[in-house]
Image (cartoon, rainbow, N blue to C red):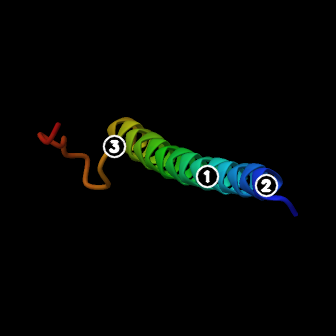
Amino acid sequence: MTPPTRLLHSWAVALQLRARRNAMVALTDCTRRRAEREDVERFLADRAAARRTPLADGSVSLHA
């Protein structure tokens, strides 16, 4: 391989590796955000269900 060809090849390989790494970082961030969103949705659903369910002894909860 001639030096210009080698340089072009190494540049292309480095660019591809950087692009793959960026995609993996983005996917990891999206996965983390989705997990957080699902946790919040689950928490809010549990809170809403707790507010709709009367206490077994008939008392009223004063906790918001």
Q: Which residue: 56% across, 51% down?
A: 31
Disc 2 marks a residue whose amino acid type is His
Disc 3 marks a residue whose amino acid type is Pro
Q: Nearer the viewer, mark 3 or mark 1?
A: 1
Q: Which numbered marker is on residue 50?
A: none
| Rendered-image quadrant of the C terminus | top left
Q: Which numbered marker is on residue 18?
A: 1
63 vs 46, left or right, is: left
Q: What distance separates the C-alpha of mark 3 from that of mark 1?
A: 56 Å
Nearer the N terminus, badge 2 or badge 3? 2
30 vs 43, left or right, is: right
Q: What secondary structure is found at the residue carrying circle 1?
A: helix
Task: Judge the density around disc 1: few (<14), some (14-19), many (≥20) Cα neighbours within 10 Å.
Answer: few
Q: Are marks 1 and 2 in contact (CB under 8 Å)?
A: no
Q: Which residue: 60% across, 55% down?
A: 21
Relative image position of residue 7 (x, y in whole percent): 72, 54
- Report the number of numbered marks: 3
Disc 1 marks a residue whose amino acid type is Arg
